[in-house]
Image (cartoon, rainbow, N blue to C red):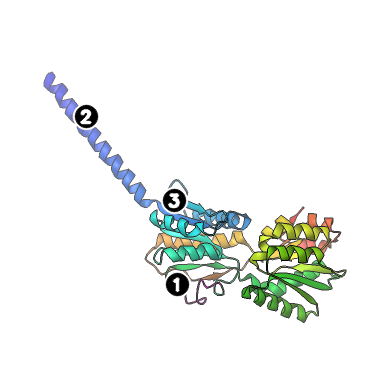
Amino acid sequence: MVKLISLWKSVLQAIALLLFMGAGAVSQGQSQTHARLGVLLPELGRPQSQSLKGLTDVLKSLGYIERKNLVIETRNAKGDRGALPRAADDLVARKVDVIFTTGTRATTAAAGVSDEIPIVFVHPGDPIAAGLVKSMTELQRNLTGVAGFAVEKTEKRLALLKELIPALRELHILFDSNNSFSRDNVALAQAAAKKISLPVVEHGVKSADELKTTLTSMRTVSGAALFHIPDDLVEGEAEFVFTTARQKKLPSMFNDESWAIQGATAAYGPSNLDMGRRAGAMIGRILKNPKNPLPPLERADKFDFIINYRTATFIGLQVSPAVLKRADKIIR
């Protein structure tokens, strides 16, 4: 009897050992199948959150589900430019399989710490002019993404503003006169306005204080409007710009949905949600076949026209039903 009990104990111990080893093997196998995605953000505003939503929606549809077989390491610099390189270094140390970035600074920071980990970006503007890539076909070894080339839509943005304000008579453009990129964009806007015989008044400024003084004292004719070009100085003072424009009853056209949400009268720009979805499809391809060449750089092909009806009403701008119908989104 004692021998039988001893034998059963040995059998049970062996079974327990096998189960433990099996569980360890399963756990090890599961950890090996977890894809690791690094996300590097300059901040978490509307454009970034929409891009992330599109990205995670597509990854989920491809079978990559967070906390099941996907680990997402997110680093948000919260507007601190100096924090981006450190955050990028940390993602590399975490041995992520792919890094997703938004905008120029985060992408530059990621590219600066690794030339091997694939980096997939979304960029509202021109990544070639920003120095991220050499051309649409000649990429860095580990860098690709989806770009909006929003400046190329200057004529379309201006045409929509003309539809929004049929009596449009004059454009006012605030920009950083020290920034050559901004000066080039002003020239593009001037050329587009010239085609429809619309005068442009340039307001080159060199500081936030000068911008505030210029906008506060700005004199405009009836039928005038603010026209936005990509410019860090102006965008850094967006709240002041929108508040002052409302006080002056001055309509404004910007180049991204987030600006319309913050108070611009209207905006026309690439869909951050759609760019995120396309970036998600790229990342899915990379995770599935990491040894394959990176997917080629893509252009955004979905652009949204947004009208802030609250702002339009406040400044006394009557928007026709036909124009409202054309809008992809109306903020009421």
- Secondary element at tag 2: helix
Of residues 98 and 290, which is closer to you in this image? 98
List the residue tagged with mark 1: 140
Count residues near mark 3 (Cα–Cα under 10 Å), then give few for <14, some for 14-19, many for 20+.
some
Which sits earlier in the primary sequence, circle 3 or circle 2? 2
Q: Secondary structure beneath disc 3?
A: strand
Labelled pair 3, 2 in contact (Cβ < 8 Å): no
Kind of residue at badge 1: Gln
Q: Is residue 137 magenta?
A: yes
Tell me the distance, in whole angstroms, between the alpha carbons under discs 1 and 2: 58 Å
Quote the CA–CA distance across marks 3 and 2: 36 Å
Left or right: 9 as drawn, with respect to 172: left
Q: Which is in the foreground here, disc 1 or disc 2? A: 1
Query: Is residue 74 inside the magenta stretch?
Result: no
Magenta segment boundaries in residue numbering: 130-138
Q: Amino acid at mark 2?
A: Leu
Q: Nearer the viewer, mark 3 or mark 2?
A: 3
Q: Indicate the position of residue 157 as horizontal and vertical percent values.
A: 72, 70
